[in-house]
């Protein structure tokens, strides 16, 4: 109901803005036609009606953006509320069962396991929201250190495989020029970025998880992480939008997949903070998605000095 009313409001503001802009243009041309012989009046009229038209267009754009932002904010609140409420309700149910009924040891252990899983889900949601706030700041207070990106990604892959209870072949990791996949950065932030991309790839793969992870050095200055799945895919028009805060792909078949719409926003923010970039590639719905994170390569000073020496000798 709320979505329908907002769509009506959006259409209303759009029609009103276009209509008012059209009226302003018509009045402006009418003024010019009636006073075309008086140059100063025509000049002032053009400035006046140009300012009115520009103001109307900018106001319409601003209102439409605010409506869209409010829709995304509400979607985020609904998603977070669900992600918090569901595990809390589950934990409460198990606790009430343990309190009012006698259960055997095996069932008691199963209840404890499920409550721990629900606790992890709660903690994950809270951390995701907190990390989104931290990722929004361009500067990091943590010290940056040399990192072997290949090793870090391998660790993240093992954690994801264990956490999602996947078979070894579900996540395939490989490196090319792995010895040169060194970067300077914050290990925790980069681990967060890699984990978010992996979780998205697994979550949107459907029943059959088949994800390829590759770390390589495409040139002397960059290190690239590519994570490719064979899942639902992304419409080409939304490849850039998926990195916006709170944005979720407009696909009804994905309504059962819960999330906060912050994962890829955090990935892009961390990549930018480290002087890199993040982008997605997909042929469309049903054709899978590849998310790429590209970071500046850390070249040791001795290597740089050696390269300069070689270039000087060649010269």
Image (tube, rainbow, N blue to C red):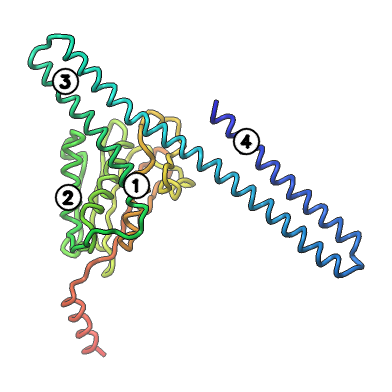
Q: Which residue is mark 1?
A: 132
Q: Are marks 4 and 2 in contact (CB under 8 Å)?
A: no
Disc 1: CA contacts within 10 A as few (<14), some (14-19) or many (>=20): some
Q: Nearer the viewer, residue 150 or 13?
A: 13
Q: Secondary structure at mark 4?
A: helix
Q: Earlier in the sequence, mark 4 or mark 2?
A: 4
Q: Secondary structure at mark 2?
A: helix
The residue at the point 14 percent across, 21 percent down is 110
Q: Which residue is mark 2?
A: 154
Q: Secondary structure at mark 3?
A: helix
Q: Earlier in the sequence, mark 1 or mark 4?
A: 4
Q: Earlier in the sequence, mark 3 or mark 2?
A: 3
Q: Quadrant of the N terminus?
A: top right
Q: Is residue 49 above or below residue 284?
A: below
Q: Earlier in the sequence, mark 4 or mark 3?
A: 4
Q: Which residue is mark 3?
A: 111
Q: Which residue is mark 4?
A: 9
């Amino acid at each position: 109901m709320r979505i329908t009313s907002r769509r009506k409001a959006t259409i209303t503001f759009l029609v009103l803005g276009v209509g008012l802009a059209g009226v302003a243009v018509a009045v402006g041309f009418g003024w010019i036609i009636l006073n075309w012989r008086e140059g100063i009046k025509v000049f002032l009229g053009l400035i006046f009606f140009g300012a009115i038209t520009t103001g109307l267009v900018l106001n319409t754009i601003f209102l439409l953006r605010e409506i869209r932002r409010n829709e995304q904010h509400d979607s985020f609140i609904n998603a977070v509320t669900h992600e918090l409420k569901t595990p809390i309700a589950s934990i409460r149910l198990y606790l009430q069962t343990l309190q009012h009924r006698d259960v055997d040891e095996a069932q008691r252990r199963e209840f404890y396991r499920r409550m721990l899983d629900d606790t992890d889900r709660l903690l994950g949601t809270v951390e995701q929201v907190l990390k989104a706030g931290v990722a929004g700041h361009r500067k990091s207070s943590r010290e940056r250190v040399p990192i072997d990106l290949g090793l870090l990604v391998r660790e993240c892959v093992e954690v994801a495989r264990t956490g999602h209870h996947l078979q070894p072949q579900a996540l395939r990791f490989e490196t090319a020029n792995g010895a040169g996949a060194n970067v300077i950065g914050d290990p925790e932030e980069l681990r967060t970025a890699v984990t978010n991309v992996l979780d998205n790839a697994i979550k949107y793969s459907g029943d059959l998880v088949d994800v390829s992870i590759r770390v390589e050095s495409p040139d002397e200055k960059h290190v690239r992480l590519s994570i490719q799945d064979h899942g639902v895919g992304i419409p080409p028009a939304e490849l850039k939008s998926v990195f916006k805060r709170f944005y979720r792909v407009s696909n009804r078949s994905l309504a059962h997949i819960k999330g906060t719409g912050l994962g890829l926003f955090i990935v892009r923010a961390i990549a930018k903070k480290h002087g890199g970039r993040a982008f997605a590639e997909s042929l469309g719905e049903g054709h899978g998605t590849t998310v790429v994170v590209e970071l500046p390569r850390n070249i040791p000073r001795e290597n740089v000095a050696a390269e300069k020496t070689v270039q000087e000798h060649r010269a």
